[in-house]
Image: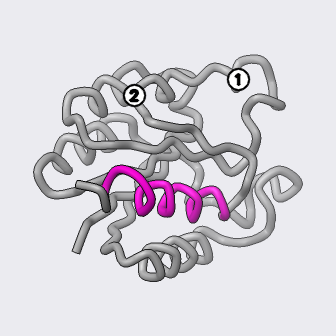
C-alpha cells in the first residue's frame, strides 16, 4: 500500500478556536479524521504530523525519505517565511502537494508569498478540509498510482 505523509504547521492544532471566521469551527481532530477517511477511500496509508516548530517539520520531511510515496504539506505561517522547508522537500525528492485551508492569494500581502510552492507539484488553497481530499486524489490520479 502506498504511503502519504501529511504535515501541518503552526497553529493548525488550534483549529476550531483560531479565527473561526477564516478557518471554520471544525477542530484539528476533525481534520485528522477527515484526512484519514479520504486516504482510506483512495487506498492509501496515511500518517499525520503537526508541529509548531520549523526544525521539527524539516526533520520529519527528511525522515520521510525512503518511507513515504507522497507528502501533503500545509506549512501554515512557514509558507511565507521558511526557506528550510522547501529546501528539505527538494532534498528528499518525494512528490509533494501544498495545501492551505484559506485562500492565501486573497489574504494579506505577506500571506500571498509561498516559498513552499516551488518545491511542490501543485498548490491547493481556499477549499478548507476538501483541499486535503483533493491532494490525496491528485496523488491517486497522477504520481503515486502511476509508478
Say above or below: 3 vs 144: below
Task: Of the two numbered discs 2 and 1 on the same chain, state the one appearing first in sequence.
Answer: 1
Q: Which residue is mark 1?
A: 112
Kindly identify which numbered label has been placed on residue 119. 2
Asked if disc 2 and disc 1 are in contact, CB closer than 8 Å, the reply is no
Considering depth in this image, is 64 or 3 the residue closer to the camera? Answer: 3
Q: Residue at x 59, y 68 (%)?
A: 28
In this rendering, would 11 be left or right of 47?
right
- The mark found on residue 89 in the picture is none
Residue at 79% across, 69% down: 25
Q: Which residues are magenta?
A: 130-144
Check the picture and name the quadrant holding the N terminus.
Answer: bottom left
Q: Residues within 10 Å of mark 2 (few under 14, many from 20)?
A: many
User: Any magenta on residue 132?
Assistant: yes
The structure residue drawn at horizontal position 67% and vertical position 63%, both measured from the top left corner, is 130
Residue 24 sits above or below residue 119 on the image: below
x and y percent of residue 98 in the render?
51, 41
Pick whichever, 62 or 53, lies toward us: 62
Label 2's element? helix
In the displayed structure image, the side of residue 107 where residue 140 appears, left or right: left
Residue 7, relative to residue 44: is it above or below?
above
Q: Residues within 10 Å of mark 1 (few under 14, many from 20)?
A: some
Above or below, 75 relative to 18: above
- Of residues 131 and 30, the one nearer the viewer is 131
Residue 111 in magenta? no
Amino acid at each position: 500500500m502506498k504511503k502519504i505523509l501529511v504535515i501541518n504547521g503552526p497553529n493548525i492544532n488550534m483549529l476550531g478556536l483560531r479565527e473561526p471566521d477564516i478557518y471554520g469551527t471544525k477542530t484539528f481532530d476533525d481534520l485528522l479524521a477527515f484526512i484519514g477517511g479520504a486516504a482510506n477511500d483512495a487506498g492509501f496509508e496515511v500518517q499525520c504530523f503537526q508541529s509548531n516548530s520549523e526544525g521539527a517539520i524539516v526533520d520529519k520531511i527528511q525522515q520521510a525519505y525512503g518511507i513515504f510515496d507522497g507528502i501533503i504539506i500545509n506549512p501554515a505561517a512557514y509558507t511565507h517565511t521558511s526557506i528550510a522547508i522547501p529546501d528539505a522537500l527538494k532534498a528528499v525528492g518525494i512528490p509533494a502537494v501544498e495545501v492551505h485551508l484559506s485562500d492565501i492569494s486573497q489574504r494579506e500581502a505577506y500571506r500571498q508569498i509561498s516559498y513552499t510552492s516551488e518545491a511542490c507539484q501543485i498548490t491547493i488553497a481556499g477549499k478548507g478540509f476538501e483541499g486535503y481530499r483533493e491532494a490525496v486524489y491528485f496523488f491517486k490520479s497522477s504520481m503515486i498510482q502511476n509508478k
